[in-house]
Image (tube, rainbow, N blue to C red):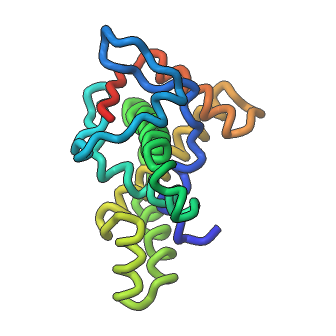
């Protein structure tokens, strides 16, 4: 796999939600299609969700949404944008749930792993201008890339522990989906987008 997509690759494998995240209390929950296709607010809010009180900023989901938007034709982008952004948010919510669980369990990664992954990506873009362009294309800077790489390694460690702890023999995707479902069932998720 090329490093160009490595920064958001882990997010891309997170399972999509089986249902839209919770609406504010008292409102009827829309169907998944209606939720995804509803026009985006303009301007977009800075905080687009809260997971167990932890805010998710629009800048955190835009890199993932951009990867998906870049895959569709230019004429289809406006029509598909709302659904793509909301699916990116759903994946990010799942990522945040997993990251919160990893931190609660005390899962840590060796900084050398993060440094090695960062250096591998940097080697692919030896020219400073090319590196800056690559980072901008990912919606990141060097610090946010390191943060994302640390999160990816933390999540991978959590899933390996989960697979070893009781889901031995299950494919990692199934382990992840089961853990996300359990975490969603007890989480406080507020979607503001």
Q: Nearer the viewer, residue 155 or 96?
A: 96
Measured from the top left, where is residue 84 in percent x and y? 49, 47
Q: Who is closer to the viewer here, 151 or 7?
A: 7
Q: Where is residue 4 in the image (x, y as percent from the top left)?
A: 52, 71
Q: Position of residue 146 (x, y in %)?
A: 36, 62
Residue drawn at 41 percent across, 58 percent down:
63
At 52% across and 39% down in the image, what residue appears?
A: 158
The quarter in which the C terminus is drawn is top left
- Residue 62 appears in the figure: yes
Give the left or right position of residue 5, taking residue 187 as reference.
right
> Nearest the camera: 35 or 123?
35
- Which residue does the image show at 73% across and 31% down from the upper left? 168
The single residue placed furthest to the top in the displayed view is 26
Number of marks: 0
Name the residue nearer the viewer: 101 or 3: 3
Task: Using residue 114 as the reference point, say whether residue 174 is left or right of it.
Answer: right
Q: In the image, what residue occupies the spot 68% across and 33% down?
A: 174
The image quarter containing residue 173 is top right
Give the answer, above or below, for where 10 lies relative to 47.
below
Instruction: State whether residue 107 appears in this view.
Output: no
Residue 1: percent from left, percent from top: 65, 67
Looking at this view, name the residue that lies furthest to the bottom.
127
């Amino acid at each position: 796999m090329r490093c160009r997509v490595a920064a958001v690759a882990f997010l891309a494998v997170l399972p999509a939600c089986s249902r839209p995240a919770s609406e504010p209390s008292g409102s009827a929950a829309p169907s998944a299609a209606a939720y995804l296709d509803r026009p985006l607010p303009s301007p977009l809010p800075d905080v687009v969700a809260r997971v167990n009180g932890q805010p998710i900023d629009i800048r955190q989901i835009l890199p993932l949404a951009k990867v998906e938007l870049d895959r569709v034709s230019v004429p289809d982008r406006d029509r598909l944008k709302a659904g793509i952004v909301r699916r990116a948010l759903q994946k990010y919510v799942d990522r945040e749930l997993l990251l919160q669980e990893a931190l609660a369990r005390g899962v840590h990664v060796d900084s050398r792993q993060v440094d090695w992954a960062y250096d591998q990506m940097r080697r692919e873009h030896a020219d400073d201008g090319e590196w800056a362009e690559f980072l901008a294309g990912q919606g990141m800077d060097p610090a946010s890339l390191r943060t994302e790489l640390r999160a990816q390694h933390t999540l991978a460690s959590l899933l390996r522990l989960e697979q070893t702890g009781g889901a031995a023999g299950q494919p990692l995707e199934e382990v992840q989906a089961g853990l996300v479902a359990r975490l969603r069932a007890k989480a406080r998720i507020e979607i503001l987008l």
